[in-house]
Amino acid sequence: ALPLGPMSVAARAPKHLLQRFISSAGTAVSLRASARAWTFPAGKRMMSTGKDGPDVSSVSSVGFRLSRSGRFSGETDPLMEQFNASFPYDKRMWRQDLQGSIAYAAALGRCGLLQKEEVESLQNGLRAVEKEWEAGKFEAKPGDEDIHTANERRLTEIVGSVGGKLHTGRSRNDQVATDVRMWLRDEITELIKHMKDLIATAVTRAEAEQDLLLPGYTHLQRAQPIRWSHWLLCYAWQWKRDVARLESVLSRVNMMPLGVGALSGHPFGIDRHLLAKDLHFDAIIQNSLDAVGDRDFIIEFLFSSSMIMVHFSRFAEDLILYSSTEFSFVSLADAYSTGSSLMPQKKNPDALELLRGKSGRVIGQTVGLLTTVKGTPSTYNKDLQEDKEPLFDAADTLKACSQIANGVLSTLTPNKEKMLAALDLPMLATDLSDHLVRKGVPFREAHHVAGAVVKLAEDRGCTLDKLSADDLRTTHPSFSDDAASSGPGGMWDYEAAVERRQTDGGTSRAAVGKQIAELKAWLSQSA
């Protein structure tokens, strides 16, 4: 494998990433299975009733009181509690939820709804909850319907009744929309970094391996010779477009919905612009109805993720073919291959096959959420709770796939001899027609003549380079002697054929070098 130094994926990827990527039992993206494993203790109720109505006196019931209040007196079916709960999967937003609440407490203080000491008490309590999460010591309770109620319940346990003031003017509608945007903002930023690392790996290899030639394919048939570097850069440019899409989505993700309440606005004159600044949003969402009901930013991210996965799938498909015995253009590192449980000789490209397979998973998440959102009326509806599992799953999948793709690319070994052996002279038939075009022959006529030359060689049972100039002139008088040259720089020299593609975007050394320079400049500017 090419020694890529700091570009090596080993310096970036989490330990045992491939094992987690391959294992369906241990993968970080098996969200639904883990979420549905959440159960409440047998026989528990989130609320008990007595002769005087609901018991809302204990701090531990605060999570349930947030969504049920005094409007309800009957018990909730435990199955409904589990069906309704999102805590098993939205708990991953614990940090963003606490950060949002710390800033919101300050905003309540600025508009006179909280005394200075109350703001400090709330913020200190929220930071204490944050430390529990960081240390892995946060204890969930059956009443924790979602991450918001869980954090507020724990806050109230720590600071007492002042914890009940934190939610003044705020709804979980604007709270969850804020949390998701903050979480996704962080995820996109990290994903962009992984994608740039992958592009840098492709550029590094392309610069170092410009001498390698291999067949270029159309319709999976040998077409024309190209540089291996040109193939690498084909995907580098696709991934660069992916980064541009992510950056564009990020600009719309980073808009703040907080401070609009359930749907109609905040009743206490909170300064949303200053709150947005505190939470590092670019601006506020201008319409309260849109703020709580908008999930465009998630769907846009899922679409961008789908495009990335389509590119990964095509990249993987190429390398699956190139690494097969029939091609043998590249050898995959053992670190990204697996064996057979029966056939000891097998070396399977499982990492690449999973890159290809997981594209369907992400595309499915995109279509699924589009279908969910299309039927909802304006503002917030409970259907929108179904946005998080596809979002989290897609983000986790992209994070793993971008690192796995980098690992595969940075450690594979190209086989120069096999690549050259796959080149054959009929791939240069187009160059024959180009020769005639330079002599003034119309392209359509030249194209027909080149085909006739290929037929002539087939009829004689010889290769094209064995035809003499006189043989060529039997098909058209405009062929000159150099059309039959097989020496360096001649008609039948593969390197010369590649070098004839000099225009920008072509596969000549100069054109490839220009691509490399442009990508390196972009990477340095966006570092």
Image (cartoon, rainbow, N blue to C red):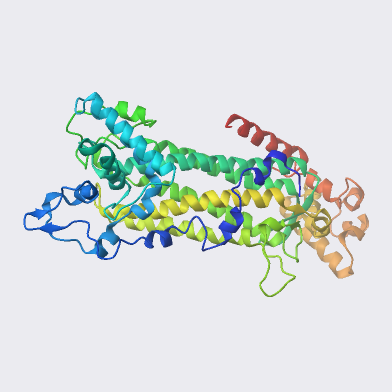
| Residue at (66, 34) in percent of width and height | 520
**Above or below 397: residue 220:** below
Residue 121 occupies quadrant? top left
14 over 253 or under it: above or below:
below
| Count of residue discs | 0
Q: Name the foreground residue: 275 vs 510.
A: 275
Q: Quadrant of the C terminus?
A: top right
In the image, 505 versus 69, the foreground residue is 69
Residue drawn at point x = 37 percent, y = 47 percent: 138
Name the side, left or right, on which 527 lies relative to 149. right
- In front here: 280 or 502? 280
**Quadrant position of residue 216:** bottom right
Relative to 359, is 417 on the left or the right? right
| Residue 182 visible at all | no
Residue 388 in the image: above or below residue 518: below
Name the quadrant containing residue 509: top right
Nearer to us in this view, 177 or 523? 177
Q: Position of residue 472 (x, y in %)?
A: 88, 57
| Image coords of residue 292 (percent x, y) | 27, 43
**Residue 122 percent location from the top left of the image:** 28, 33
| Residue 114 seen anywhere in this rendered image of the structure | yes
Q: Position of residue 186 (x, y in %)?
A: 45, 39
